[in-house]
Image: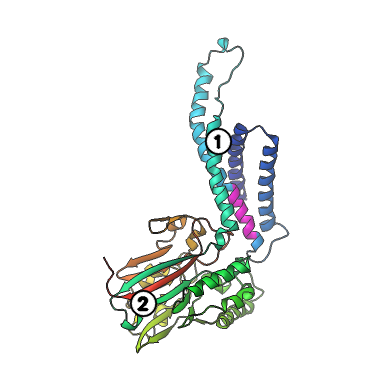
Amino acid sequence: MIRWIIFVAIIGVADYYAFQSLKTVTKSNWWYALYWLFTIAVIGNFIFQFYGFNRSNGFSQANSFAVGFLIALIVPKLILIAIMFAEDVFRIPQGIYSYFMQDDSNSGGQIKHLPSRRRFISQIALGLAAIPFASILYGMYKGKYNFKVLKYTLHFEDLPDAFDGYKLTQISDVHSGSFDNIDKVKYAIDLINEQQSDVILFTGDMVNNKAEEMLPYVDIFKQLKAKHGLYSVLGNHDYGDYVSWNSEADKRQNLEDLKALQKGIGFDLLLNENRFIEKDGQRIAIIGVENWGKGGFKKAGDLKKASSLVDKDDFKILLSHDPSHWDAEVVNAEYHYHLTLSGHTHGMQFGIEIPGWFKWSPVKWRYKQWAGIYETLGQYINVNRGFGYLAFPGRVGIWPEITVIELKKGAKEA
């Protein structure tokens, strides 16, 4: 009940200011009708999807679009609130002053204490609010499939000579249950293969909740090719923890089905395990932990177990879905993990990014490492922004990512 009261209060205040700005700019009843029709339809659909007869077990595509349109409705109105309230900071004191100081005898019977809203302020407010509105709709329509190939070169003095120039491709957070365009997914798989990397590494969250979500895309993902194979780990969503099951046996079977699907695609799923890639008599270790995350997420990862049989001096690439694992256990571990690959954050699917210069997303307040390359104590982590999307059915400014990392022998160039 408290949540509903807060929700209604926010919507009410937002609509008061938004409609005030609209009335200041236009007197057209058609625009008024369109405004209220859109508002009522979006809110009504949201309530129906989450609290009506259409409720389902798990988070459906219909649920995600209900969330998306609600965000498209609320965010622009929050901007209107900020601008129109700022105008009221000046209007209200003027109205109070007029109330006490106006000489009614000289007003001709016309008493007007509160100044009218200025039309150009409302025009500016509506113009600024239109930017996130259009961006969110674009993100839902095209942004979620706006795949970007991000390339990095990392230098290591102790990289085995045979692996100088070695290329790896990382993908993460497929969330196949959210997809609604199979051709766009195929395009992304072709884009991965075009990179011609030596190995492909997947860092978890193949599905939202259930293995069956991946079935329409298995044949497409089977087309993934790399000379030294495909390796993967599980993410927090892969365990089926976020839906109700008829029994624990059903939940366990779902995980086994997902493991079988990954194997069928060609992934070598590492469950607190390691593998070696050998080349010209030298080797590097690929180490994979199960999900380990702070903040209430599953901690099934066992770094020591995963690193068994790995020598202290081996060059190590660690796959760990949640980047919070890096600071918590990896950086200061007994072994030196040269490169950790993570995902999980999605870059919040929303932010502002100018490649090579500036990046920002609200998720930075939750995760210290949230997108791209970070370095500590001579160890690197790459946090992939994600291949798919979850909850909000789109991406704004933080696009779906295919990471290509080239390993180079020697010190980093100045």
Which residue: 55% across, 83% down? 263
Residue 59 drawn in magenta: no
The mark found on residue 123 in the picture is 1
Relative to 51, 271 lies left or right: left
Which residue: 40% across, 72% down? 405
Determine whether the residue tagged by mark 1 lies in a helix, strand or loop. Answer: helix
- Foreground of the two, 167 or 349: 167
Which residue: 55% across, 58% down? 143
The residue beneath circle 2 is: 165
Q: Is residue 147 above or below residue 125?
A: below
Residue 65 drawn in magenta: yes
Q: Which residues are magenta?
A: 63-73
Which residue: 62% across, 45% down? 8
- Horizontal and vertical percent for residue 227? 46, 83
- Residue 274 visible? The answer is yes
Q: Is residue 347 above or below residue 154?
A: above
How packed is label 1: few (under 14 Cα within 10 Å), some, or many (20 or more)? some
- Residue 208 visible? The answer is no
Furthest-front residue in this view: 194
Q: Quadrant of the C terminus?
A: bottom left
Q: Nearer the viewer, mark 1 or mark 2?
A: 2
Q: Quadrant of residue 302?
A: bottom left
